[in-house]
Amino acid sequence: MQPRLRPRVAASRHPTSVGGRRPGGFTGRPGRYGAGMQKWEYATVPLLVHATKQILDNWGQDGWELVAVVPGPNPEQLVAYLKRPVGERA
């Protein structure tokens, strides 16, 4: 039994392109992709287990969005990763 061969795709077109355009509006031209993308700033914040809600509420009031919470260096501590759009200061 011979292995199946994939159909050839013209070199000038992306295999999943529609009408010559790639998915997501990416055209392959430098400087075009990401021109309107949101820029973010990030913060890493230690969380105290007994005051987690208060700490996160304070950061949230300043425009920060919680991305993740991971274990900290000791069992009583967590670390929060937050983000907010660049230039958005409360």
Image (cartoon, helix red, strand yellow):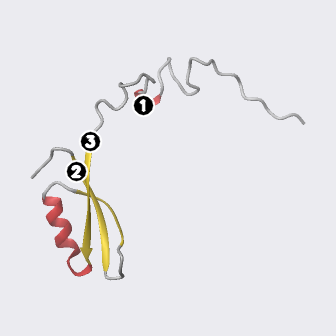
Residue that badge 3 annotates: 39
10 Å crowding of disc 1: few (<14), some (14-19), many (20+): few
| Residue 13, placed above or below residue 64 | above
Q: 40 or 4: nearer the eye?
A: 40
Q: Quadrant of the rendered structure where residue 11 is?
A: top right
Residue that badge 1 annotates: 24
* Residue at 46% in and 29% down: 23
Q: Which mark is residue 89?
A: none
Residue that badge 2 annotates: 84
Q: Residue furthest right?
A: 1
Q: Residue furthest front?
A: 73
Q: CA distance from mark 3 to mark 1?
A: 18 Å
* Residue at 22% in and 81% down: 50
Q: Nearer the viewer, mark 3 or mark 1?
A: 3
Residue 9 position within the rendered picture, expressed as x and y whole percent measured from the top left? 65, 21
Q: Quadrant of the rendered structure where residue 72 is?
A: bottom left
Q: 71 or 60: nearer the eye?
A: 71
* Residue at 16% in and 66% down: 57
Could you tell me which secondary element the residue under label 3 belongs to?
loop
Q: Nearer the viewer, mark 2 or mark 1?
A: 2
Q: CA distance from mark 2 to mark 3?
A: 9 Å
10 Å crowding of disc 2: few (<14), some (14-19), many (20+): many
Q: Do the residues bearing badges 3 and 1 touch, measured as CB atoms within 8 Å?
A: no
Residue 86 position within the rendered picture, expressed as x and y whole percent measured from the top left? 20, 45
* Residue at 22% in and 51% down: 84
Name which residue type carries label 3. Lys
First-in-chain label (3 vs 1) = 1
Could you tell me which secondary element the residue under label 1 belongs to?
helix
In the image, 77: left or right of 57? right
Q: For the N terminus, which image quadrant?
A: top right
Name which residue type carries label 1. Gly
